[in-house]
Amino acid sequence: MLLVIEEQELQQLPITIDPEIVSGAPVFRGTRVPIDALMNNLEAGLNLDEFLDNFPTVSREQALQVLDFYKSTLTRLGKAN
């Protein structure tokens, strides 16, 4: 199965991928906080407010945009099957 994510959709995300920042890991734009940090914190049982307290350079809007992207991507995957 192939899932296509349009370039325009990716450009709207608050994410930067730069080999000079955290070895090219996707990070929240304007920070050095990897996107994985959000997912790992949520997986560990922290809520969004706790994540934001731990990473004050990430805005609530940025975190919500990333979570919405994950949700919509998983929804598309479910509909593709």
Image (cartoon, rainbow, N blue to C red):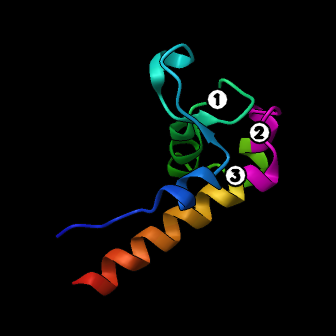
* Residue 74 location, quadrant: bottom left
- The earlier-in-sequence mark between 2 and 3 is 2
Q: Residue 58 carries which label?
A: 2
Residue 58 counted in the magenta span: yes
- Horizontal side of 52 relative to 41 (left or right) equals right
Q: How far across and how far down the image is residue 18, in percent?
A: 53, 24
- Horizontal side of 56 relative to 36 (left or right) equals right
Which residue is disc 3 drawn over? 63
Q: Are marks 2 and 1 in contact (CB under 8 Å)?
A: yes
Which residue is disc 1 drawn over? 33
Q: Do the residues labelled 2 and 3 touch (CB within 8 Å)?
A: yes
The total of numbered circles placed on residues is 3
Where 46 falls versus 32 (above or below)?
A: below
Q: Which mark is residue 71?
A: none
- Residue at (59, 44) in percent of width and height: 38
Q: Which residue lies furthest to the top in this view?
A: 20
Residue 9 counted in the magenta span: no
Label 1: which secondary element = loop
Identity, as a three-letter code, of the amino acid under mark 2: Val
Where 20 falls versus 25 (above or below)?
A: above
Q: How far across and how far down the image is residue 11, in percent?
A: 60, 51
Q: Identify which residue, 47 or 23, lies in the foreground.
A: 23
- Residue at (42, 78) in percent of width and height: 75
For the residues marked 3 and 1, what is the alpha-carbon distance in whole angstroms? 11 Å
Which residues fall within the magenta stretch? 52-62
For the residues marked 2 and 1, what is the alpha-carbon distance in whole angstroms? 8 Å
For the residues marked 2 and 3, what is the alpha-carbon distance in whole angstroms? 7 Å
Q: How far across and how far down the image is residue 20, in percent?
A: 54, 13
Label 2: which secondary element = loop
